Amino acid sequence: MRVELPSHLETLPAVARLSAKWVFVIGALSALAPLSIDTYLPALPALSDDLSASPGQVQLTIAGCLVGLALGQLAAGPISDSVGRRAPLLVGLGLYTLASLLCAFAPTVWLLTAFRIVQGASGAAGVVIGRAIARDLYEGAAVVRLFGLTMLVGGLAPVLAPVAGAQLLRVASWRGTFVALALIGLVLLVAIAATVRETLAPERRVSRGFAGIRTSFAIVSRDGDFVGYVCANALPFAAMFVYIAGSPYVLQDVYGLSPQAFSAAFALNAIGIVTAAQIGGRLAGRVHPRRLLACGLGISATGAAGLLATALVDGPLVAILVSLFLVVGAIGLVLPNATALALRHHRDRAGSASAVLGATQFTIGGLAAPVVGLVGTGSAVPMAALIAGLSFAALVPFAVLTGAD
């Protein structure tokens, strides 16, 4: 489905002909979050030794990035509704590049955590504004297809990031991963500055100032359907980040996988996300997105139940890996459809709606991720219990607050 471009974009080619460009741009921006988190996962044990930090303290560096991503979206989304998408996006990418360099030279785990908050907050501009750009240009099933296609680009990040991180450990310390992230930020900054034009027409921008931002947040937050889809999106997303925080210790320390084998298992789960997203994208327009979302939530809950049962009986590694594949792969159905459903009635405040959606994701994820380290990494049970609780909790707001239409 194609929509009319804003008047200031009439000189650009039709959206249908720009789809490949927007898939790449929005996918690359959405990849900043998994790149920032996943690249150094194989190095967590080495980082812990180098900085003399406990597993719980090291996992705070993950939580710090997630908190930064949440707070940054709450700022960048409404700002982009007021002043346009392009300028806040470029500023965010510039700060992301600088923050990544600061992480590379952090002398203590506490400074690293602080720099990770800044890195997440600045990278959030790309995540939230990318979704808002998609909503500027597309409607209905086309939004679902676009979000599904962007996971071909953004989905490569969790596939390649831990693999690249494991290979970087052969030639550099964990600090090299942050130098690599700084280079990625710089490349994105230059590429987007050269190729991306403004997508939000001046006449569609909302009022500036705190009052305008507060009004936008109030409008979207009073929409019960929106809140339901936000929660149905955020809770499985948080379960995935519990997996991200806990799996390096569970799979490497408990089950004895090498960093390279761990990165391969991690990549397989990311391939599951991409595959599920493409299946959902092909079904968009023929199957209602709410039904696709229900399917994703059901698969996630099934995998979580299997994971918890296996962990409780100290089951084999293969059962753990299959269960994790279902939990993580289901994200490919959950995220595109929940995002499209949440944003469908808020085109004029897409930045603010996208900010609430993303901030809720990363706040819950940021709170849940370090719990694994706090309650123990000596077995798979704490990670499995948290994942199961979050996956089943997602079914409640979906069933209670949302409705088919």
Image: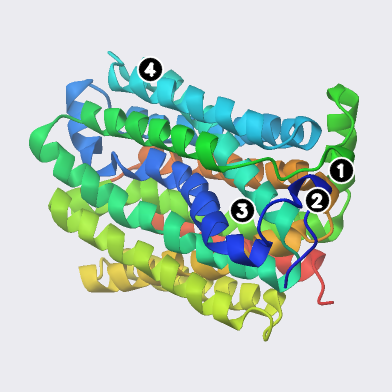
Find disc 2 in the rendering and name its residue. Answer: 6
Q: Decide: marks 2, 1 in contact (CB < 8 A)?
A: yes
- Three-letter code, disc 2: Pro
Q: Determine which quarter of the picture holds residue 48.
A: top left
Which x, y percent locates residue 389?
Answer: 54, 59
Q: Which residue lies furthest to the bottom in this view?
A: 286
On the image, numbered disc 4 is attached to which residue?
110
Where residue 90 appears, as percent x and y from the top left, is: 56, 30
Distance from Cα at disc 2 to Cα at disc 1: 9 Å
SS category of the residue bearing label 2: loop
- Secondary structure of residue under mark 1: helix
Between the C-alphas of marks 1 and 3, the distance is 28 Å
Q: What residue type is labelled 3?
A: Ala
> What amino acid is at disc 4?
Trp
User: Does residue 56 sit above or below 299 in this rendering?
Assistant: above
Q: Do the residues labelled 4 and 2 touch (CB within 8 Å)?
A: no
Residue 358 relative to residue 93: left or right: right
Q: Closest to the observer: 362 or 9?
A: 9
What residue appears at the point 26 percent right and 34 percent down from the top-left corner? 177
Looking at the image, is mark 2 or mark 1 earlier in the sequence?
Answer: 2
Classify 10 Å Cα crowding around label 1: few (below 14), some (14-19), many (20 and above): some
- Cα separation, mark 4 vs mark 1, equals 42 Å
Q: Earlier in the sequence, mark 4 or mark 2?
A: 2
Q: What is the distance, in whole Å, between disc 3 and disc 4 at their CAs? A: 27 Å
SS for tag 4?
helix
- The earlier-in-sequence mark between 3 and 4 is 4
Indicate which disc, 4 or 1, sits on the residue closer to the N terminus: 4
